Amino acid sequence: MTTAIKQQARLGKGHYLAGNVQRYKTKSKKEWATDAWKYFNTSSIYKSDTSKFSKNIPKSRFNTCFDPHLKIIERIQNVQIQISDNHFSLPISLNHIAKSIINSQAIMLLENDWDDDGADATNLNTYLKAVSFVVSYSKFIFESLKVVIDYPDIDILRDGSVSVFWETHKATFLIIFKKNDNRYSYFFGNNKVDGIPFKYAIDNQGKIDEITAKWMSQNLN
């Protein structure tokens, strides 16, 4: 059996299609597509403790990405995330970022005094600002600058603000979304190599700041 046949069909960063690859000759393209759908349908990427996710992904989401002679199939192009009535979409190459967002939804379950020392709960609007930033910037960097950045840690602060923090071998980057402050969010980045800080603010109601996006693409991958 050739090396190509032995390899499992890769579906995005860190994910592989489970199944008996040795039986590829007996499976039709439709059967492989069904197997892929079952894999993603049970993946934690679509599960959340605080919201429901649509599992009715249209057939158009499947596009052939492997040698048709191997009949090793089609791949889902986008990861869908729904938070309350807000819908977000990320390329499958950024599924590690989608997982980080989904895992962070636990902070929405925290009530006032969640640390037994008077800490405030956050609210949906504050959390959505953080998620929107992560989705829009990681997506822009991937699609426009052709870079896949690392996943961030999204967490709650004692005053109910939401922090988004990246740490790579190159740099650290922290941005804080203040509770009930809708316009600007301030961040601090630090390059570990030259120690030069990068401080600025983004307009939560504005467009992508390309200077910030370029710094992130160079330091957070």
Image: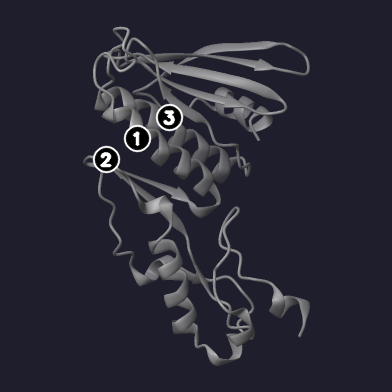
Q: Which mark sits nearer the N-terminus, 3 or 1?
A: 1
Q: Which mark is residue 105?
A: 1
Is residue 184 toward the left or the right of residue 16 in the image?
left
Q: Label 1's element? A: helix
Residue type (three-letter) at the residue carrying disc 2: Thr
Q: Which residue is mark 2?
A: 50
| Residue shown at the point (46%, 33%) measured from the top left | 134
Q: Give whichever of 20, 61 is nearer the camera.
A: 20
| Marks 2/3: CA–CA distance | 20 Å
Element under disc 2: loop
User: Residue 77 bears which disc, if any?
Assistant: none
What residue is shown with label 3? 133
Badge 3 marks a residue whose secondary structure is helix
Vertical placement of 182 versus 2: above or below? above
Please report the residue visible at 41 percent of the width from the left and 15 percent of the height from the top: 185
Rendered location of residue 31, percent (x, y): 45, 83
Residue located farthest toward the left when viewing the structure as drawn: 85
Is 83 positioned to the left or the right of 153 in the image?
Answer: left
Q: Nearer the viewer, residue 28 or 155?
A: 155
How many residues crowd mark 2 within 10 Å: few (<14), some (14–19), many (20+)? some
